Image: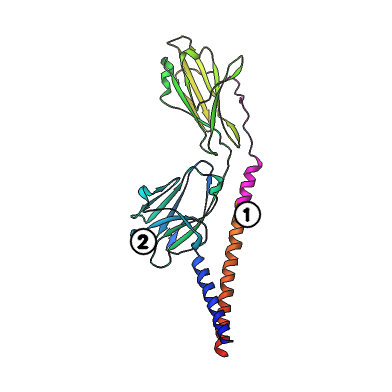
Amino acid sequence: MLKEDNLLWKKMEWLLIILICSLPASGSLMAEERATGVVGRTVTISCHYNKQEYESHKKYWCQKWLRFRCAVLVDTTTEIGKQGRISIIDDKTQRIFTVTMSNLTSADTGWYNCGIESSGLDSMFAVYIHISDVMVSEPLLKFVRPANVSCIGGSVSVSCESLHGSLPITYAWYEKTQRATSEISHSNSLCLHCKNISEDQQYQCTASNNKGNASSAMLQVSLLKAAEKDCRFSVYIRNTGNMFNSCEDFPVNTDMEPNPIIEQTTISENTFQTIAVANESLSSYIICSSLRWAGFIFLLISAILVTCWTKKN
């Protein structure tokens, strides 16, 4: 009977050791508990450590929540602190090491850990990252170089960029005249010069990805002087909250009908599905953590009871 009790006690000890070693949280290391990213783009995590002794220790970034299953993806001993799509930089002055994951995919969603190698148990902090597939945002138009050269016959370049949304993003430019609307370019920049301006015209850029498309504000060109080489034209951009006019001293015809060439896609159900997935992941984490702590308490109480019962007998 005594041998069986000792065996049971040893099993309890091992279970306690495994459970304690699996807990990743550490008071000496902190980071954001949750982070979000977008497919094709970049996410950055800052891990803060508060002990001076850790300045010379190896820092790392590993995947999985449990300590003993966390696979190291990159560490500060790696050449130039980079491994594939993931990089790590340790700022010993600020006591922050920063992890950057680029070219994100949906498969990158999951649990990770900031880690600092120690002589005993490593200091670790768990971070959950959720990667979403997001529709493009409304493209913004801006002059690539000073636009007032259009007033003296020079060429003007306008760029189109959607700052948010999953990559890759493709762009197209459309030209609208009094007679017709036509697609003129598959680039994110548009070059305007005397040879292709013979009347007042409007242009619009569209950005597209696998979740939908969005159209920019209208770019309006007013012809001030028609000529093949020495023309004059004014370029007018109305972005949200901003207006840009290349020729402030010249009148601009703003009566042209600013109907969008392509209607902007509205937010789809995927946005709400993304929110639901994130909430579900948080709920799963809370349930999982609660069960682990409950298991830890149960094993601790069981171990105490077994010890008391063994001594009594």
Q: Please tell me which residue is depicted at 58% across the width and 16% down the height of the picture.
A: 177
**Quick check: is 260 in the magenta stretch?**
yes
Residues 299 and 181: in front is: 299
- In the rendered view of the protein, which quadrant contains the N terminus? bottom right
Residues 312 and 46: in front is: 312
Q: Indicate the position of residue 227 as horizontal and vertical percent values.
A: 46, 9
Label 2 secondary element: helix
Label 1 secondary element: helix
Crowding at dot 2, Cα within 10 Å, few <14 / some 14-19 / many 20+, comes out as some
Asked if disc 1 and disc 2 are in contact, CB closer than 8 Å, the reply is no
Mark 2 residue type:
Tyr
In the rendered structure, which segment of residues is drawn in magenta? 252-277
Q: Indicate the position of residue 210 as horizontal and vertical percent values.
A: 59, 36
Q: How is the image coloured?
A: rainbow
Mark 1 residue type:
Glu
**Quick check: is 164 in the magenta stretch?**
no
Please, is residue 179 above or below residue 141 in the view? above
Please, is residue 36 above or below residue 201 in the view? below
Q: Indicate the position of residue 33 as horizontal and vertical percent values.
A: 51, 56
Q: Residue 54 carries which label?
A: 2
Q: Indicate the position of residue 128 as horizontal and vertical percent values.
A: 53, 54
N-terminal label among 1 and 2: 2
When asked about the image quadrant of residue 211, the answer is: top right
Check disc 1 and report the residue beneath it: 280
Please, is residue 226 above or below residue 85 in the view? above
Furthest residue in direction top, as rendered: 227
Furthest residue in direction bottom, as rendered: 313
